[in-house]
Image (cartoon, rainbow, N blue to C red):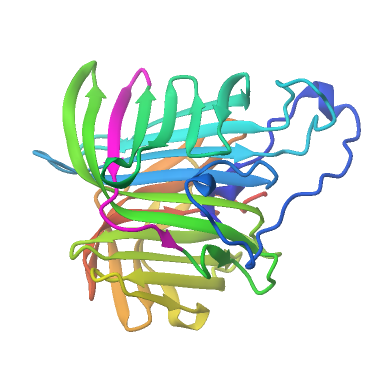
Amino acid sequence: MRRRSFLLAPLLLPAFTAAKQPAVRYAAASRATRLAFPRDHGAHPDFRTEWWYVTGALDTAQGDAGFQLTFFRSRPGLAEDLASPIAASQILFAHAALTLPGKPLLHAERAGRANLGAGFSSADCDVHIGAWSMRRSGTGAAEQFRLKVADAAFGFDLQLAPTQPLLLQGENGWSQKGPRPELASHYVSWPQLQVAGNLTLDGRRQPAAGRAWFDHEWSSEVLAAGGVGWDWIGVNLDDGGALMAFRIRDAAGATLYAHAALRDAAGRLTQFGAGEVSFTPVRHWPSPRNGARYPVQMAIRCGPHTIETMPVQDAQEISAHRPLPVSYWEGLVKIRGTLSGRGYLELTGYAGALKL
């Protein structure tokens, strides 16, 4: 999908908006594609949208804490006929957040043009905007992701080490998002990453440890006509398993498409079709910024399993402004029911229909 493609609006420049732009042909996600790594950890600039997304739950003396870092790449269809390496044909932006026990959500953002303060690799996961970066390195026992964020309010420097194999969502990484086959993405997850490193708060560094979830997704079309947003959850289960589930909603809140994948602690993967997945709001949190009502407590059914989300705090709405204003809820939750664990719930399209 993934989920955040609504954020990948182009950064329009007056020099290019004045003239009509030629039609751009974007690559399409294909079920015939066979992914290869580390190459497919890298960027896919022929596609319209892409993101590298990491969320994690940290164990602190004060209680459960959470972190999020997402890099987005957008191909807006501008300046593609210019030879300049700094033409606005590829835009990068990033969101970072910290959820700390008993404290307001901390959030920061960055944006940049490829080759002008920002960049990405097409050979491996290596993306940056200024001092913010996400990079994969090493093989075997030495393989890791390293995340660096430095903002005036907070920062982190974290190493994420795999404890289990990649999880290719859908059909070998081809993830359908609607009834038409072109509504799809290539989607790779890496659950149960072991986290070590440090957080920086008020200028002071403190150790951090926990578990994280990595998503990488690229697509050119994912939201069907009538879709206004989606709900998504990724959970590192207490027993070592992993659960991902999503649904796409219309303006009335009805589900247009849904899917879920459960990998148990032994590595057995079970996938659930649209008729086996449901999201039912239990309790809403009203945003004081915009009046959006987010169903932060949600009952989610995946085949024989029913879970309920319990946010560690309600106020985990992110309001970003670059490249364009957008608000969505993305926060650390615990789950209870037939499965237990910690993960992140994402709720989009509640502060207005998403404009892709």
Left or right? Give the position of 190 relative to 175.
left
Left or right? Give the position of 237 relative to 290.
left
Q: Residue at x 88, y 26 (%)?
A: 18
Left or right? Give the position of 120 relative to 208.
right
In the picture shown, does residue 114 fall above or below 309? above
User: Where residue 229 appears, x then y in whole percent?
Assistant: 56, 58
- Nearer to the camera, 139 or 229: 139
Quadrant (top left/top right/bottom left/bottom right) for the N terminus: bottom right
In the picture shown, does residue 105 fall above or below 206? below
Q: Residue at x 50, y 37 (%)?
A: 71
Left or right? Give the position of 26 relative to 99.
right
Res 66 seen here: yes
Q: Would residue 152 be counted in the magenta stretch?
A: yes
Q: Residue at x 44, y 82 (%)?
A: 276
When asked about the image quadrant of residue 137, the answer is top left
Q: Would residue 302 be counted in the magenta stretch?
A: no
- Nearer to the camera, 104 or 46: 46
User: Where residue 140 appears, x then y in whole percent?
Assistant: 31, 47
User: Where residue 231 appears, x then y in whole percent?
Assistant: 47, 61
User: Where residue 27 appears, x then y in whole percent?
Assistant: 72, 52
- Count of marks, rendered view: 0
Q: Which residues are magenta?
A: 151-168
Res 288 seen here: no
